[in-house]
Amino acid sequence: MSSETHSLVSLFSQMFAPLCYHCQTNIVDEIFITLDDPDLGKRTYHEQHFFCAECGDPFVPPGAGSRSFSGDGTFKA
């Protein structure tokens, strides 16, 4: 990748990529966590930054694959 292409990709991610709620940096990874809660609002996280604030354990184990959760608590694999 040329330096000009790299600069354009970097600029694009700074302008349009979502920010991680935990570290406040742009998320350019293919896999990330998105929440849309009526009380908390919309939040996005790097996969490794989506963890229990009390104990630090991740909610989604690394390498667990693609999963989606609906707002009513049901799980779809």
Image (cartoon, rainbow, N blue to C red):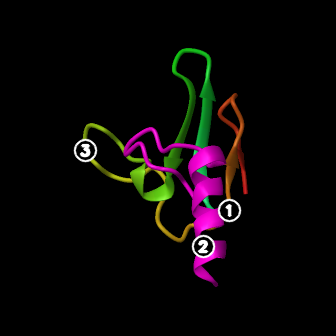
Residue 71 relative to residue 59: left or right: right
Residue 64 relative to residue 53: left or right: right
Quadrant in the picture for residue 1: bottom right
Q: Which residue does the image show at 28% across and 48% down from the upper left? A: 56
- Residue 10 percent across, percent down from the top left: 57, 62
Foreground label between 2 and 1: 2
Q: What range of the chain is rendered magenta?
A: 1-30
Label 3, on which residue?
55
As drawn, the label of residue 77 is none
Q: Amino acid at mark 2?
A: His
- Residue 5 percent across, percent down from the top left: 66, 74
Label 2, on which residue?
6
The total of numbered circles placed on residues is: 3
Q: Amino acid at mark 3?
A: Cys
Residues marked 3 and 1 touching at CB (< 8 Å): no
In the structure shown, which secondary structural element does the residue marked by tag 1 occupy?
loop
Tell me if residue 18 comes above or below residue 72 in the rendering.
Answer: below
User: For the view shown, which residue lies furthest in the left direction?
Assistant: 55
Foreground label between 2 and 3: 2
Tell me if residue 22 comes above or below residue 49 in the rendering.
Answer: above
User: For the view shown, which residue lies furthest in the front direction?
Assistant: 4
As drawn, the label of residue 66 is 1
Q: Amino acid at mark 1?
A: Ser
- Residue 21 percent across, percent down from the top left: 45, 38
**Quadrant including the C terminus:** bottom right
Sort mark 2 into few (<14), some (14-19) or many (20+) by Cα contacts within 10 Å. Answer: few
Sort mark 3 into few (<14), some (14-19) or many (20+) by Cα contacts within 10 Å. Answer: few
